[in-house]
Image (cartoon, rainbow, N blue to C red):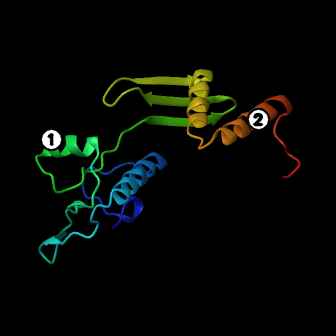
Amino acid sequence: LSFGDCSCITKDQLPATAQVASQQGEYLASIMNRKFNLSPPVAGSDDEPLLPPPTRETGVTQTTVSDAIASFATKEDDFAKPFQFLNLGILAYTGGGSALAQVTTSPGGPSVKGSGKIGNLVWRSVYLSKQVSWRNRLLVLNDWTKRQLFGRDITRL
């Protein structure tokens, strides 16, 4: 089983970003946690083997609402729903208290764009929301406040 940078995608390639890797990791973890069979038999010729998606094991695999919707839509109950990348947007800190931001509000919907101070505000709010705990959020806010008040610490250069 390979995912992300280790796999070979021949069509509809995804950008090599942390956003893609994070979503692929969540997908793979959910597949593993729900006990899908990750070693299905290989189909196709010897030159170009075709690997089907992970299969359900009767009585072992747990089913979720999204699985039920995907199996209804594809009319296929034996396989896991395929990975779908959701582009959440692009953020870039440009230094000097400014940033570029393009954040998607809903799948296929319009995106919010900002640059300069507004982009920096969007960048910081997304950065804080992605922290794993409230402790980390408070530490990051503390670091930003110290840097704003006292400037960068240049004693360790």
Q: Quadrant of residue 120?
A: top right
| Label drawn at residue 50 | none
Query: In this view of the protein, can residue 66 be seen by the observer?
Result: yes
Q: Amino acid at mark 2?
A: Asn
Residue nearest the observer in this picture, 150 or 75: 75
- Sequence-first tag of 1 and 2: 1
| Label drawn at residue 73 | 1
Query: In this view of the protein, can residue 93 be seen by the observer?
Result: no
Label 1: which secondary element: helix
Q: Amino acid at mark 1?
A: Ala
In x, y percent, where is residue 35? 32, 61
Q: Quadrant of residue 94?
A: top right
Residue 124 versus residue 35 in the image, above or below: above
Q: To which residue does mark 2 refer?
A: 142
Query: Seen from this angle, which residue lies furthest front?
Result: 59
In x, y percent, where is residue 46? 15, 78
Label 2: which secondary element: helix
The residue at 39%/58% (across/down) is 4
Residue 145 versus residue 59 in the image, above or below: above
